[in-house]
Amino acid sequence: MLSGFIKFILGFFLAIAVLIGGGAAIGLYFMNRTGIPPAKPVFSNDSPSVKAQAPKATEPKGAKPTPGTKAESSPSPTSTATESPKATPSPKPLPSGAYRGRVSWSEGLSLRSQPNQEAEKIGGVGFNQKIIILEQSEDKAWQKIRLEGSEQEGWVKAGNTQKVDEQ
């Protein structure tokens, strides 16, 4: 009778130990799985190639209804001809050494008042936004930019912009 009671007690403690050990192993497994960040989702409007194709797809649709009305189609090219020169030049002429570019960092950039990390944030620049690169800092770690179509200027971290060919 005493040996049966000892076997029961040992079996009970062994079962408790197995349950605690298994619970800890499962807990650690799920904690490690949630500690890994998921892959960043890619949306169709994030890709520059999709953005470039979208206006081409909408232009033919807009062109189909207008050929039936020839009176409306003739002012339309005139208005687009007047709009394109307004969109291309910036408010200020480009200084020597400046060039057009775009933001290539997918998160966007912080616009700072001075070329250092501790400087005041004066704004932000979104992904793929058109900019004008005015100059680089002496250590080539920062670039002074102007937002295209605006007078706002500031400094961004170098290497996060890409030169755009002017057409």
Image (cartoon, rainbow, N blue to C red):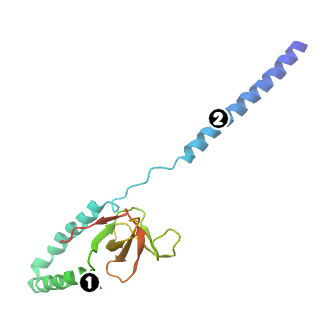
Instruction: State the mark number for residue 25.
Output: 2
Q: CA distance from mark 1 to mark 2?
A: 66 Å
Dividing the image into 4 quarters, which one contains the C terminus?
bottom left
Of mark 1 and mark 2, the one earlier in the sequence is 2
Relative horizontal placement of residue 22, taking residue 131 as reference (left or right):
right
* Residue 120 point in image, percent of width and height: 52, 75
The amino acid pointed to by label 1 is: Pro
Element assignment for label 1: loop
The amino acid pointed to by label 2 is: Ala
* Residue 134 point in image, percent of width and height: 33, 75
* Residue matched to label 1: 93
Tell me if label 1 and label 2 are in contact, CB under 8 Å.
no
Res 67 quadrant in image: bottom left
Q: Residue at x 72, y 33 (%)?
A: 20
The residue mark sitting in front, 1 or 2, is 1
Q: Residue at x 15, y 83 (%)?
A: 81
* The furthest residue to the right: 2
* Residue 115 point in image, percent of width and height: 45, 71
Res 155 quadrant in image: bottom left
**1 w.r.t. 51: above or below:** above
Element assignment for label 2: helix
The answer to whether one can see residue 1 in this image is: no
Q: Residues within 10 Å of mark 1 (few under 14, many from 20)?
A: few
* Residue 108 point in image, percent of width and height: 41, 66
